[in-house]
Structures are given as C-alpha cells and as structure tokens.
Image (cartoon, rainbow, N blue to C red):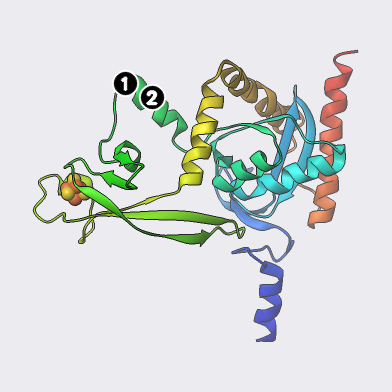
Amino acid sequence: MAKYQQQEAILKQRNSYSKTDTDATFMRMKDDHMQNGQLKPAYNVQASTNNQYLTNYTLAQTTADTTTLKDHINNHIENYKQKPETLTADAGYGSEENYTDLEDKEITAYVKYNYFHKEQKDKKKGKSNPFHPDQLYYNQQTDTYYCPMGQAMTYLGSYQKKTKNGFSQELHRYQAQNCDGCPLRSRCHKSKHNRIIERNYNLIRLKSKARKLLLSEQGVAKRKQRCWDVEAVFGNIKHNMNFKRFMLRGIGKVNVEIGLVAMAHNLKKYSLTL
Ligand code: SF4
C-alpha cells in the first residue's frame, strides 16, 4: 500500500511516469532516433513566437495541448507584466475553457476549433448534414428544436459537466417525442430510444466568435503567419540546431535546458539582423 501511495503521489493527474525521470511522462513520439514511433519519457514543450523569436515557453506533463494554454499565457503575463493583445493557435487549443480564459483576459483569439477546416470545406462544396444539431431548426421563444421529420424536440433539462481541469460546462438536453417507425431513423441516430441532443450554448457562442475572427482579413493573415512564425522556430531548433532530446532530467533542469536553447535560437536569429 505504501508503495502504491508513493507512486500515486508521483503520478498526480498523469497516467504514466518514467522511472529514470519521474517528472517525465510517456508520450508517443513521431519518430525516435531509430525512426520508430514509440512511447518515450517526454515533456510537452509549449512555445510562443513573435516574428520567429521565441517569446515564451512552458513545459507540460500532459500529452494533450488543450489543457496547457492557460498556464502558458499566465507565464507570459508573469514574465512580461502585460498580456499579449492577440493570440493565434491551431485547433488543438480551441476548447471552451481556453476561449473563455482568453475572453476573460481580453485577448483577441485567432484560435481554430476542431472541424473548422472541414466546416469551411463542406460550406464551399455546399455539403451539409441535415441531422447535425447545428443544422436543426431552433425556435428560441419555445426553446424547441425541430428534427428533419419536423418533429419537436423539447427541452429535457440541463446539467453541469466538469473538464479534467475542473472547468464547468453547462449542457442543455432536448428529446424527440417519438422516433418509432421514422423512415429517417437509420440516418438520424443509433439510440434505441427517442433521439436526444445536447447543446452547449456558451461554446456555440464562443465558436461563432472565433469563426468570425478566423475568417476576417486579419484572421486569414494571422493563420498564414502562424505557419511560418512558429513552425520555422521548431524547424530551426530540431533540424538546424539538431536539438531533439533533452540531456538533463527533472522538470526544473529541463526548464533551464529549453531556456538555453531558446536563448541560443533568439541570439542566432538576432545576429542575422546585424
Ligand atoms: S429519427 Fe426521430 S429525431 Fe430523427 S428524424 Fe426521425 S423522428 Fe426526427
């Protein structure tokens, strides 16, 4: 029991840790030095850039990027004593929690959400799924959705859900009255009961705000800039500087190591302007 308790204390919220560096978590690598994709002890480096200068970095012990943004921005604010005016990030960061945090901090967020590209592609091709909750007709006055068969989906109630980070989400549920014998049923849903849909109105609002920003002239330019701004920095560090593995162990030392790499990158870049 004592051994398990000790291991759980090291794990905290994680599913794994390395025995040789207990701060490192097992993560799937794209390729190791032998060109095999494998699980390896790793840190998830979060980096911000501005015109290819590395301006902020944090180390995360989780594989998913979604939950790392808040701490990363807080680190920026703590170091620079000011918040960034805008932030551009890819779809891995487009969650309700992140959008809310950026809105609270009054940072203009050019952050994609899942399916942003698919949504735009389908729109161009004129494709749409009439069964998708976003496509159902909604009567705001009666708080009722109407399914493709024209049946009313009435409000069942709402409930709160907590994310891994403890962020509270509110979901509203609606149910169709009777799906028995409906000719569209096989295309509409797989449930044995009458169809239920869930709507998160805060996320719908935040996604609509993000969509507007992403499709604006500035948003298109920001999205293009993201590719050559941050990806080029990773390319330089990994390929040109050949920095692919940390040499030190422990999150404190690894933080110093990535800091030295960041300084080297920035100084090299600066020297090219002299
Ligand atoms: S299966 Fe139910 S919810 Fe779907 S179209 Fe038919 S009646 Fe409407």
Of residues 76 and 105, which is closer to you in this image? Answer: 105
Read off the residue under disc 2. Answer: 121
Q: Are marks 1 and 2 in contact (CB under 8 Å)?
A: yes
On screen, residue 239 above or below 158 = above
Tag shown at residue 133: none
Q: Residue furthest front?
A: 141
Label 1 crowd (10 A; few <14 / some 14-19 / many >=20): few
Read off the residue under disc 1. Answer: 125
Q: Residue furthest right?
A: 274
Amino acid, disc 1: Lys
Percent across and percent down for residue 103 are 64, 39
Amino acid, disc 2: Lys
132 sits to left or right of 66: left
273 sits to left or right of 147: right
On screen, residue 119 above or below 132 = above
Label 2 crowd (10 A; few <14 / some 14-19 / many >=20): few
Residue 34 visible to an observer of this rendering: no
